Amino acid sequence: MAESERRVCGGCTACCKTHGIFTLVPQKMPGKWCPHCEIGKRCRIYGQHPRECRDFACSWLLNIGAGGPDYRPDKTRIVPEHKILPRIGLSLWLFEVSNGALDLKFVRKWTLNNLRKGNCVMHLPLRAGPKLYLPQRIQDQEFNFVIEPQMQTVEVIWFPESELAFA
Ligand code: SF4
Ligand code: SF4
């Protein structure tokens, strides 16, 4: 990556709300601000923060298919993360920072574009359970959709309903 393309979190602290940090005591649950976060500024325990936090980089920070510089997660209110899921392959996870952000036009566009490329897309709203949208290439309805042990039940939306929801 060229030096000019390097991205930094700057004042973004969005993933300190969206992601669970299970090695903190007490555990920090997904969708709640971390008690150590000075929102929009910094981590108050930076340097002693958990490895889960140190190792995390969202897809915007990594500059992989998550929009240009203006799409920093504190501005879009969506934290994007790419994950490889067993038997499913590449999936784009979109974590909501503020209620309603998953309804924004750019989210609909990203979701549809990814489904058409054959990628799965997971939406993680703040006030409802996660929804997994599947592309046409996945037809095996015997999949076991226990995606992560701590995750509540995932609603699975099969093709073509998955694409129709965003067309
Ligand atoms: S959401 Fe991305 S840009 Fe924002 S603080 Fe987390 S890793 Fe950095
Ligand atoms: S410990 Fe620090 S980096 Fe980790 S979630 Fe809390 S505020 Fe964010």
Image: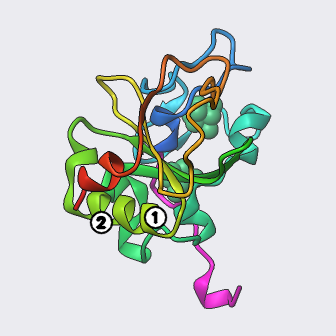
Residue 70 belongs to the span the image colors magenta? no
| 8 displayed left or right of 99 | right
Q: Amino acid at mark 2?
A: Lys
Q: Give SS at disc 1.
A: helix
Is residue 159 visible to us here? yes
In space, the residues marked 1 and 2 are separated at their CA atoms by 9 Å
Residue 8 belongs to the span the image colors magenta? yes
Residue 117 location (% of width, % of height): 50, 70
Q: Main secondary structure of the magenta part?
A: loop
Q: Which of these two is toward me, 95 or 132?
A: 132
Residue 154 location (% of width, % of height): 47, 25
Q: Tell me the quarter of the image containing the N terminus.
A: bottom right
| 123 displayed left or right of 19 | left
Q: Which of these two is toward me, 105 or 56?
A: 105
Q: Which residue is mark 2?
A: 109
- Ranked by sequence position, the earlier of labels 1 and 2 is 2
Is residue 44 visible to us here? no
Q: Tell me the quarter of the image containing the C terminus.
A: bottom left
Q: Which residue is mark 1?
A: 114
Q: Amino acid at mark 1?
A: Asn
Crowd class of label 1 (few under 14; some 14 to 19; many from 20; radius 10 Å): many
Q: Residue at 62% of width from left, 17% of height from top?
A: 150
Q: Which residues are magenta?
A: 1-13
